[in-house]
């Protein structure tokens, strides 16, 4: 790590990415819930559908998905930028590779939105497949990311165990 940088600045740089990604995970869980309500609305009988439509779950899911796409991409870039800023290199590791794959998956999932709005069922299946794979990537990223955060904390404070 850069030794002449104040600890508070190192901390800000180092923890921006994990905080952004935690926000996207929480937002993603809510988007998953909204997506399930959209599917339920589409498959419900007429009376139930009429009531569910009032919730505008499809609009909320779409809008939240758009925000999550932006934050996910910016979060991925910020993680690489923070690593490069603090260490003057990127570490090619499973965390980086799966992170790049997850950025691709979230972009693919978003790409299917206009096709789903046109009623293409195959696009819905592709969207759900991409987001399901993304959920798996997020769990893996959380595990490897926690290890990285603990290592950074140890380096910052010169401790051998946290």
Image (cartoon, rainbow, N blue to C red):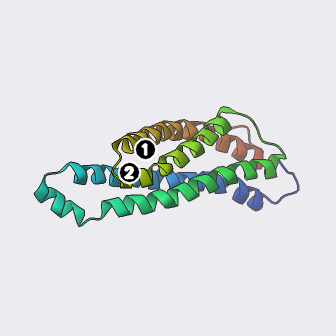
The residue indicated by pointer 2 is: 116
**Of all residues shown, which one is farthest toward the top?**
94
Name the residue rendered at 78%, 42% in the picture: 90
Left or right position of 141 against 149: left
Local crowd size for mark 2, using a 10 Å CA cut-off: few (<14), some (14–19), many (≥20) = some
Q: CA distance from mark 1 to mark 2?
A: 9 Å
Vertical arrangement, residue 51 with respect to residue 136, above or below? below
Label 2 residue SS:
helix
User: In terms of sequence position, does the residue under pointer 1 or pointer 2 come before the other?
Assistant: 2
> In x, y percent, where is residue 161?
68, 38
Q: Quadrant of the C terminus?
A: top right
Left or right: where 84 falls relative to 146:
right
Residue wearing tag 1: 127
Task: Assess whether mark 2 and mark 1 are in contact (beta carbons under 8 angstroms).
Answer: yes
Q: Position of residue 146 (x, y in %)?
A: 60, 41
Q: Does residue 155 lie above or below 49 as drawn?
A: above
Q: Closer to the camera, 141 or 42?
A: 42
The residue lying toward the viewer, choosing from 89 and 9, is 89
Q: Is residue 123 visible?
A: yes
Mark 1 element type: helix
Question: Measured from the top left, where is residue 104 in percent x and y?
Answer: 58, 43
Q: Residue 32: which numbered mark, if any?
A: none
- Depth check, front residue: 109 or 100: 109
Residue that appears at 64% across and 37% down: 95
């Amino acid at each position: 790590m850069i030794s002449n940088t104040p600890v508070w600045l190192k901390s800000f740089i180092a923890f921006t990415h994990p905080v952004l990604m935690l926000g996207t995970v929480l937002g993603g869980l809510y988007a998953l819930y909204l997506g399930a309500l959209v599917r339920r609305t589409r498959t419900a009988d007429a009376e139930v559908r009429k009531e569910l439509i009032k919730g505008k779950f499809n609009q909320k899911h779409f809008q939240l998905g758009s925000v999550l796409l932006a934050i996910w991409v910016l979060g991925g870039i910020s993680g690489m930028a923070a690593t490069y800023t603090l260490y003057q290199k990127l570490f090619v590791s499973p965390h980086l590779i799966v992170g790049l794959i997850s950025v691709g998956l979230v972009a693919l999932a978003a790409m299917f939105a206009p096709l789903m709005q046109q009623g293409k069922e195959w696009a819905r299946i592709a969207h759900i497949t991409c987001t399901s794979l993304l959920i798996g990537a997020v769990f893996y990223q959380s595990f490897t990311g926690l290890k990285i955060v603990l290592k950074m904390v140890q380096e910052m404070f010169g401790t051998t165990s946290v």
